[in-house]
Amino acid sequence: MKEIIKNPSKITNIVPAEELSCKLPNTFCAGNAKLENTNPCGRQEVQVEQIEPIQAVACTEDCNCILPFCCRYTVPQGFGPVTEVGLEKEIFYYSNLYYVVDDEPCTVDVLPPEGCTILGVDIYPIRIVGCIPYVASVKIASENTCTHTATGSTENYTDPVTGLRVGLSLDQNLVINQVVGYVTSPEVSPVVSGQLIPCSDIQVAFIAGPSSCLTGSEDAQGTIIEFKGNFKIVNCPISDVIAE
């Protein structure tokens, strides 16, 4: 009987032997994940970057359209006591105030219908920053004071004028940084960051007279003048639609 001899079959590996030891990475690529070719098998591995959740900032500042101010100064000695009768007072001011729309929102809680979860809604603060330089001015009567205008020459002497009102003034600068409104988005804000607030949009209410807050070192004969009042922003508070 003839012996049958079978030739052994040769198996060719499609994947090299060293590749068979590489496991497929159990990873995915999404969001801000970074891809890195660090696998010695030539495969792409994915390293997922940990992203810290954004912490919500609560809206805590109230809207305030009023800018209070107060200044006091002393009438120079010898000009006589100041009385409320016949006292003239003025304030001269201009605006260095600007609207600023915050880039980052804050969150306010909104109450939905009963039984629902409280919602956190993002809104954007609008604030006014800058200053209001102003001059507080009064005119007081002083019978003991003499006044002159320029005589045109250092040798042209004339009689003085007496019994006139004396003008006194004091320079002040009111610095402001406060919230005047909120909007749902900077795109719908009625004002833009860096927009100047003209002085015509700033009202003022004040009183002036002898101060009632005197210390022992101050003259109690009415020589301390006090200006006290408020500036007010006209178009305030600000929202997506300016309040009437």
Image: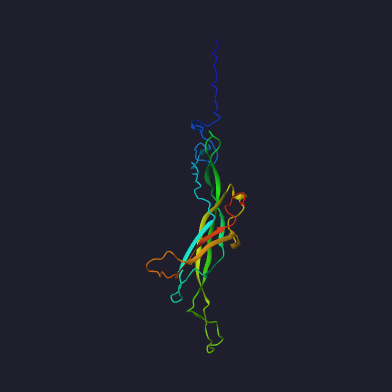
In percent of width and height, residue 179 lies at 53, 53
In this view, 49 is above or below 161: above
Q: Is the residue 165 above or below the residue 47 in the image?
A: below
Residue 31 % position (x, y):
55, 40
Report the side of 100 relative to 72 (left or right). Answer: right
Q: Residue furthest top?
A: 1
Q: Report which quarter residue 111 is drawn in.
A: top right
Residue lying farthest to the front in this orientation = 85
The residue closer to the viewer here, 235 or 229, is 229
- Image location (x, y in percent) of residue 16: 52, 32
For this orientation, the residue located farthest to the bottom is 155
Please provide percent x and percent y for residue 102: 55, 52
Asked if residue 219 is positioned above or below residue 163 in the image, the reply reads: above
Q: Quadrant of the N terminus?
A: top right
Quadrant in the picture for residue 6? top right
Query: Observer-nearest residue: 43 or 17?
Result: 43
Identity of the residue furthest to the left in this view:
216
Colouring: rainbow
Say how many tags the image has.
0
